[in-house]
Structure formats: C-alpha cells, structure tokens
Amino acid sequence: MAVQVSKTGTGKSYIGYDDKGYLWCEELKVVDVLKNVGTSPFFLYSKAQLESNFQAYVEATKGMDAIIGYAIKANNNLNLLRILANRGSGAVLVSGGELLLAEKAGFDLQKTVLNGNGKTMEEISLAVTKGCLINVDSEFDLEHIIQASRQVGRKARVLIRINPDIDPQVHPYVSTGLANSKFGIRNTHLEWFLNRIKQESSFLDLVGVHCHLGSTIKQVKIFKDAATIMLEFVSIIRNAGFHHLQFLNIGGGLGIDYERQGDVIPTPEELVASIRDKVKEAKLTLIIEPGRSIAGNTGVLISRVIGVKSNGNKEFIVIDGSMSEVIRPSLYDAFHWIGLIAPSSGELSKFDVVGPICESADFLGKDRMLPRPEEGSGIVVMDAGAYCYAMASNYNMRPKPAEILVDGKQWKCIRRRETFEDMLMLYDQK
Amino acid sequence: MAVQVSKTGTGKSYIGYDDKGYLWCEELKVVDVLKNVGTSPFFLYSKAQLESNFQAYVEATKGMDAIIGYAIKANNNLNLLRILANRGSGAVLVSGGELLLAEKAGFDLQKTVLNGNGKTMEEISLAVTKGCLINVDSEFDLEHIIQASRQVGRKARVLIRINPDIDPQVHPYVSTGLANSKFGIRNTHLEWFLNRIKQESSFLDLVGVHCHLGSTIKQVKIFKDAATIMLEFVSIIRNAGFHHLQFLNIGGGLGIDYERQGDVIPTPEELVASIRDKVKEAKLTLIIEPGRSIAGNTGVLISRVIGVKSNGNKEFIVIDGSMSEVIRPSLYDAFHWIGLIAPSSGELSKFDVVGPICESADFLGKDRMLPRPEEGSGIVVMDAGAYCYAMASNYNMRPKPAEILVDGKQWKCIRRRETFEDMLMLYDQK
C-alpha cells in the first residue's frame, strides 16, 4: 500500500514515501535506519529539510532589512541550532538556558531576542551583558530591565511587547495575543511605558515593538491585520519622540500541515509579501520568529510496534513511543499523521495508536485507518520536529530517546539516548 | 491573613498553616527553608507525611494477607522510595527503569508487580528473572511473557488484568477501567487466556487477577463494585482448574482532596473495610496499588513571585515555577490549591497564577483569590507530591528543580537541581 504524504507549505519535502510504500528520509530508507540504530523510539531529522525551511524565510525576506529569529524553544538540539546559526539565522530565546545554548551554537547574539513574561533578574542581566534585544512584557519586567542595566552598566536594547488583541483562531493553549493573555503590556498603559523609558534613557534604548499572536496559524490575513495595528503603534511611539525606532517584530506562529490532507498553509513568502511594502515604507527592520514552520516537518518519531490488541469494539496498536516523547496529542488535542514505514499486506482497520505508559492520556493518534502491522515493524509519527523532544519527560522512568540526523546518504546520532544511570545523575549518593 | 488548609483523608497533615498565616512543613517554617535553599522553584516533601500516609494502608490491611504496592510512577525519587521500602512497602512498576530503581531502593522484588499494556521483551525478561509478579494485559503480552520465561528458564508468576468496565467518574485521561480503555484483556476472551496458560504451564504460574479503574477516585462504592465483579472472575478461574489462585489486585486510584474545601475522601481504612470480608472469605491475598494517596499531599512546589501584572481586566501573578514542573493543570485541567507561604497585607484580588514559559498553557491556577504578593515572596502549589516531578520536562531549557526533604527540624536535598551543563550531558561532543 503506497501511502501518499502531501508536501508542506514551506517547500520541498525530504521525508516522504516512495511508490512502493517505503518511508524515506533524504536518501535513506527509514527501515534501514531503524535496523542500524537498533533501539527505539528515536527522533529522525532531515538536514536538507531544515535548511530548506530556513532558506524559504531567507528568500521571503530578500530585499528588505530583516532578522529571521529561529524560536529555539521549538527544538533546541545543539547540532540543529549550529546548522541554523551557520546559515545566519538569528534566535529567539525564552530563558537563560536558551541564551547560553544560543551562544554555544554560535548565533550572533546581536541578532537574538530575549522574550518572556517572567524573566528572572539573572536572565535579564545576562541578556544585557551579551547585547541581546529584550522584549518588555510588563511594568515589573521593565523595572527589572532597568535594574539589570544599572547593575551591568550597559544600555539595554528593548522592544515593547504589544498585545494586538487579535484572535488567531487556534487552540487556546497556543493563542497568545488576546487581551486575556498573560503576555504583553496593557496598551492603555503605553504612555506610562514611554515616559518611564524616557526617564531611564541612560539605561534603555527603545528600538522596536513586538507582538506574538499564537501558534499553528494558517491565515496570512491574521499576520497582516497584526502588522497594520502594530504600524499604528510604531507611529504613535515615533511621534512620542522615539524617531529612531527600528524593529517591527511580528512574532512567529505560522502553522504547518499536520493533517497532510493538502491543507493550504501560507508560505513564508506569502506571509512576508502581505506586509513587505508597509514595513519598507515605514523604514523598519522586520523581525520574524519562526519555530514550528522551520523545525516541525524536519523531524519524525520512529517507533516499533510492541503488539496489536483488541478490546472488543476497539483496536489498539501499541508502540514503544509514547506521550513522554510526543505530548502534543494529549496536551493540545493535536493531530500528527501516523503511518507504517514499510509496505504492509495487513488488512486495513481502524486503530488507536497508543504508547506503553500507564495512563489513558498516552496516545499518539485515535481512530486511524492503518494496515494491521506485524510486531516489531516501524511506525512513524510525522511532523515531530517541533515541541516534541523539547517537551519530553522521563515519565514512567523512560529514558529520553536518541536524535538522529540524516544528511544525504549518511546518518549520525546528534544526541544520544539517555541511560538508566543518566536518570540517576541528580542524586549525590547513588 | 491566616489561610486554613484542610486536612486530607489519609490522616494527619504535616504541611499546613499556623494561625498567623505561615506555612510550615513539619517543624520548619517554609519561608526559612526557601531562604536557606536559595534557588527556586523546588519541591518540598514531608517525611512524616509520607510515613503517615503509608502507615494508613498498613493499618487498613491489618489482619489480612495483603501487599501494599506503592505505584512508583507517582513519584520515583529514590530517597522517598527507600523510606517506603524500609517500611515494608511493595511496589508497582510500569517499566524496566522502574524495576531497576525499585531494586536499588531495596524493595523486596517478590512483592512487586510489573504492569503495563506495552511491556518490551527486555522488561518482561528482567521481571521474570527477578521474580516479580507480572500482569498479563493482552494476547500478545501473554505470548511475550511465555517467550521471556522460556528464554530465562524460569516460571513467570502472572496475574490477568481484567477490565471490569466500571466508570470511575473522573477525567477521561485518568480513567482506565472502561471497555474502551487500552488496558486489560477482553473479558470475552478469558477462556482463551486460561487455556493458553494451561498449555504453557511449565512457563506460567497464574497466581491472581488484577484490575485498575482509574485515578483520583472519591467513592468507596466504585472499589466495592469492582471487587464484587473481580470475585466472580476469581470463582470462574478457580473453577477452571486454577484452585491455588492467590492474589486479588484491585489496583489503585484513591483520590486526595486537591480542592482543600473539606471534601470527604475515603480513607484507606474505609476503602479496605468495604471489601475486607469478601476478600478474606475467598481466601485471597489483597494487592492494592496506591500512588497519589501516598505521595500526593507529601510534597509541594515552592516558587518565588517574579512580578504581578495586569492586562486590564485580568491580573496575573508570575512565578518562577511553571508547567515544566507541574503539568497537571494544563494536561488534566487539574486543580491545585495555591497560596502565599507567609502572611501578607496585600489587598485580596483575583489572579491567574502563571509561570514564565512562553506558552498560554503555562498556568498553575486560574481565578484565585489571593493577597497581592510582593516580588520575591514565596508561593506554594499544594499537593504536588504525585505526578509532578515524575512528569517534569526541560521545556524552554528549564533545569529540573531540586527536591528537598524535611524530617522534623531538619531539611536536606534529596535530588539536586539540574545545571545547564547537565542539560548538555547527552551530547557526545559539547
């Protein structure tokens, strides 16, 4: 059975099926990779897919001043970060840990943004020291940034995070730009912020504005509306005396085609085209913060079938992958396309695909039409490159899985599987 | 303001407030512990609470043959496990990692049960080798156990996991005993299982039956109904020739009073009393698998306030704890009681208590009436001893927090906080 997997909106697909029903990652058959890697589950990434997804943003922003700030929280594998840093990517950081990691990966820290509603003093001080851009999220956050700048003895380059109150029409957990969100300043307090920044102009350099609407967004119009609103704020702020305001950070949040039913997802080109003229006209440098649309379809989770069982009217494929590697289905009710990695003559039937964790929340997919697989055969959970390993846990004392990177005909382990001993590392006396 | 925290159903409360509004853990004021520990957030446990909760099960099962099998998945801190193992607790295991950990903690492995719908061959072989009881979950699981016993050259002691199809009236994610669940055998196939076990009697010793209804259960009647159904199965199985069937494992799942509004939760005494006579009459050894009711109110998460912000009609307390330590609110829509750890003269107001993670799912509690706290002051998330650290992640490159154990007037670190370097441990080349 040849399962067709559609291409995503961000360009060519480097992980997909051939006509015979074998899954390939670049020039390697995934069944062969599974055999050679040995243990499962593991995450499998395509280098070409990562580079191609990033390149789509490079091309989309050609001819304009722009920073492509990869959102490290989506996938923070150091070796993947190095690939992006080498290509000139900026980075969006949400913790001190991510800042240190970005430095280690070789990102130009002038092209990084520290974001977040609850930055600690230590994190802000580090960001000021390293010259990162810093988003101001609230009154207390601004005061902390002032304090940190005083201590460090260096001006902080700040952007104000504005809440445009636009509904991104996504799951509430990944919606961040509504008035009820924990993120961003009260727009009615903008004047207070501007006055406070003026008062502390020896410690603060207001260089831009930021917004972030949410995640898994599928409509360009939402970004366009946000840009329109943000440009009004830019005018207000410039007219208040901040004539050199330089950056418009429109955040991230572009969705990907998880369903793989040919859904039309805007490309980075379409997204940027919808706002390009306005941004250039206003003489602004665009910052864009893609995470999922760069990392999402770059990786998949490869598992083995432990067994197939029936509870009368319901059938289950039990795999060795679980919610401890991919929590998105149970946390966000998210859909990931699931398939076998090799052709199968098994009868088609409707299955829940579940993991071995002792908990009903441990499912990867429900009601999936799949050929009945043999024990030991490989199962792929597609589009697991973003917000999967990054959110992985050791629930049920499960070791974190290996991460494997494919480059053409070669594969290598870019983060090894955790061992039982590793899981005991934080005990002083074993 | 003195906040009163009610006692839980399982006995005396060792973590609670005094009349002045200070939170105590045994004989230590938590504000002092916070000051001395330094970094936050951290988990804080009471040794006396753990022992008292376990003791409640010991007393409940006095005068009958019983194994109290602590469900390690609830909280697997090695030092807490050692306390329970020393007191004679058995253990319920759901992975090979938990089995190795139970051995390290000193549990008598004859009093452990390996559970799960997706055990690997390696895990089963280990369990057979070590003499654990093993729950048979499905046809393929039974075949794997037979295979493992052959390989190891030792009889497996097995229980059949029966699905009693009882609604525990809890969140679907923690409900496990309904016909649509991924767990347990099809009851209509029981005869097949019994015949197969007879055929392979040189490799299998059928010693009991098992069921597990779910979690956070608040009604004794649900356990009683399950026991009635299970005893019918015991009769059927004994009459089929397994006269020596010894164990009735009624699983775990007793809830705790997360709301702390004085909800009446059955005690272990009440639970066991409701089935005691029937179990003794049937000459069975009872196995019970408490996790949450032993570990849940044993621990709390202590965080510091980073700041307080308003988005117009909504106010937020931003703390340095987050969904990466306590995912239950966002994953299960679970309620944890939240309070300040010291008296405050702050004006009472309604707040969302949120963490610093860049995601709207990162909340600990919503719409909580609390005094407006000072920056840096301590916040407690109560009843965080079960399914919190065990499910913790490094999302946003957050290090796993320290775990602190209080014993009377003493505290010690029983698992250290992760460092940035620790988080890079799985890269071969840094």
Image (cartoon, coloured by chain):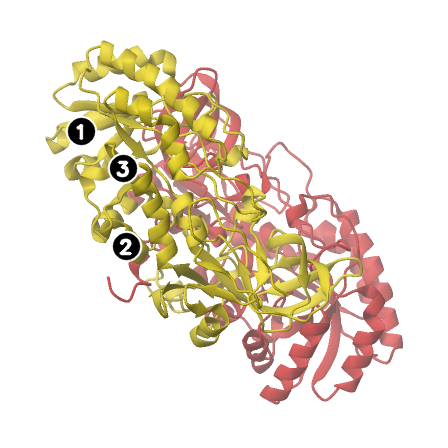
Chain colours: A yellow, B red
Q: Chain of mark 3?
A: A
**For the residue carrying disc 2, how many other residues have a C-alpha within 10 Å: few (<14), some (14-19), or many (20+)?**
some
The image shows residue B176 at horizontal and vertical percentages of: 69, 54
Determine whether label 2 and label 1 are within 8 Å by CB: no
Asked if B308 appears above or below B356 in the picture, the reply is above
Does residue A105 appear left or right of residue B155 in this picture?
left
Depth check: give the residue in front, B36 or B243.
Answer: B243
- The answer to which quarter of the image holds residue B89 is bottom right
Which of the 4 image quarters holds residue B219? top right
In the picture of the structure, the residue carrying the numbered disc 2 is A83
Residue to which mark 3 is pinned: A62
Mark 1 closeness class: few <14, some 14–19, many ≥20 residues within 10 Å: many
Q: Is residue A210 above or below residue B301?
A: above
Residue B63 seen in the figure: no
Comparing A140 with A262, the one in front is A262
Residue B47 is situated, as x and y percent measured from the top left of the image, at 47, 53
Kindly report which numbered mark, 2 or 1, lies closer to the viewer in this rendering.
2
Q: Which residue is mark 1?
A: A156
The chain holding disc 2 is: A
Q: Amino acid at mark 3?
A: Lys
